Amino acid sequence: MFGGLRERLQSARALLSGSIEAAAAAPPSEKPDAPAASRSAAPEPQVRPPAKKTATFASKVRTFVIDRELIITEKELADALYELEMTLLESDVALPVTDAIIAHVKKDLVGKHRRIGQSVDSLVVSTLRSALLGVLGEGFDLITYIKNHERPVKILFTGVNGTGKTTTVAKVGDFLKKQGFTVVIGAGDTYRAGAIEQIEVHAERTGIKIIQHQQGADPSAVLFDAVQYAVSHKMDVILADTAGRFHTKANLMSQLEKIRRVMKPDLVVYVDEAIAGNDAVVRAAEFDRTVGADAVVLTKADMDSRGGAAISIAHTIGKPLMFLGTGQGYDDIVPFSPEAVVEELLGDA
Ligand SMILES: Nc1nc2c(ncn2[C@@H]2O[C@H](COP(=O)(O)OP(=O)(O)O)[C@@H](O)[C@H]2O)c(=O)[nH]1
Ligand SMILES: [Mg+2]
């Protein structure tokens, strides 16, 4: 994933480095903010107004500092920052997140005294790195959470229909099982025809115990039973699947409220697909406002080359990303690591 964004970020990085190098190399009279008159070959009045002389002197001081140090002006970075901004927006990075990244880069680079000769590129890369880490948040380490939490840990998966909730439940179950935890799945999507059979197949293939009722049953009752089963069998984790759709949206909300009351989940995980881009970010924010979420899983990251949702979601809703879904197989899930994402975007591959 991130292929397109990586490529474009690399050119924004080169442009930023280029601008700084040009700023460092240009003789003071060719500085972009030197008054046009001093660069022009056009006939000049014999006596220059004193104000202009002062301006020329001031701009020299602003851009070039004694002792091989440099002050970078905002103007010198303007084009490169604009390019970076467009790169992010066109990659579906949410506007407030783009603003935060640009502000960070500007604050880091503009006005700072830097020794010329130090690698400009490494300065740019470390700035971009910290700007991205600043918006990506910490991630959510589910293994550590489970280890530090009273068992069974109850995790409710919610979100829009078709985004990959059921698949994610199976993947997370398989992931946790391989880490040595005991897992039970609650088949809480009783709304859609075929949903129970679908998760039953996943449970069978991954060898995970499943608690299910008939189609049309009250999902709260199924999940209550799943919790009872986990408690009596001293299991570590309950993964609750839910429907992403109900007769009406109000109905869905009240269903989820009831599930919350009855099941008392330790974690509510909002699932959406990375390919939805900014729509996923908007939906996650709305879901968090109305129902509340503790963490986010973004699926179909393998089909998303823009990466905007993955970059934006944690900063926008203030809740961590827990996993990225990267395909249709059970192994196609990766715990979200901000460092790994930044390495993928900025590393020299
Ligand atoms: N490429 C890809 N497909 C996925 C991923 N996660 C889920 N899917 C597919 O998305 C479709 C819907 O998934 P499902 O789990 O039924 O979604 P739900 O309605 O939210 O439960 C299925 O065809 C899944 O195989 C993923 O990470 N990558
Ligand atoms: Mg489902």
Image (cartoon, rainbow, N blue to C red):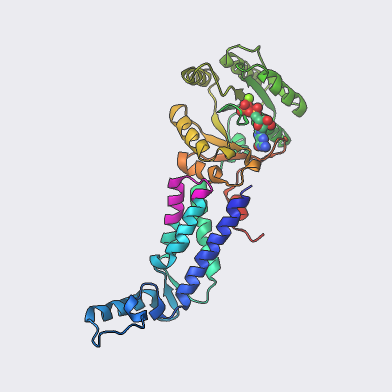
Asked if residue 342 shows in the view, the reply is no
**Residue at 31% across, 76% down:** 58
The majority secondary structure of the magenta stretch comes to helix
Task: Report which quarter residue 72 is drawn in.
Answer: bottom left
- Tell me what residue is drawn at x 52 percent, y 40 percent: 320
Q: Quadrant of ligand 2?
A: top right
**Residue 117 in view here:** yes
Q: Is residue 91 magenta?
A: yes
Residue furthest toward the front? Answer: 42
Q: Residue furthest bottom?
A: 46
Quarter of the figure that contains the C terminus: bottom right
Q: Is residue 319 above or below residue 48?
A: above
Position of 47 compared to 117: left or right? left
| Residue 33 covered by magenta stretch | no
Q: Which residues are magenta?
A: 89-103
Residue drawn at 46 percent across, 47 percent down: 97
Q: Is residue 212 above or below residue 141?
A: above
- Please state the horizontal and vertical placement of residue 117, each as a whole percent of the image: 52, 77
Q: Position of residue 291 (x, y in %)?
A: 47, 26
Q: Nearer the viewer, residue 153 or 215?
A: 215
In the rendering, at what x and y percent does residue 260 appear? Answer: 51, 21
Give the percent coordinates (x, y) of residue 241. Answer: 62, 24
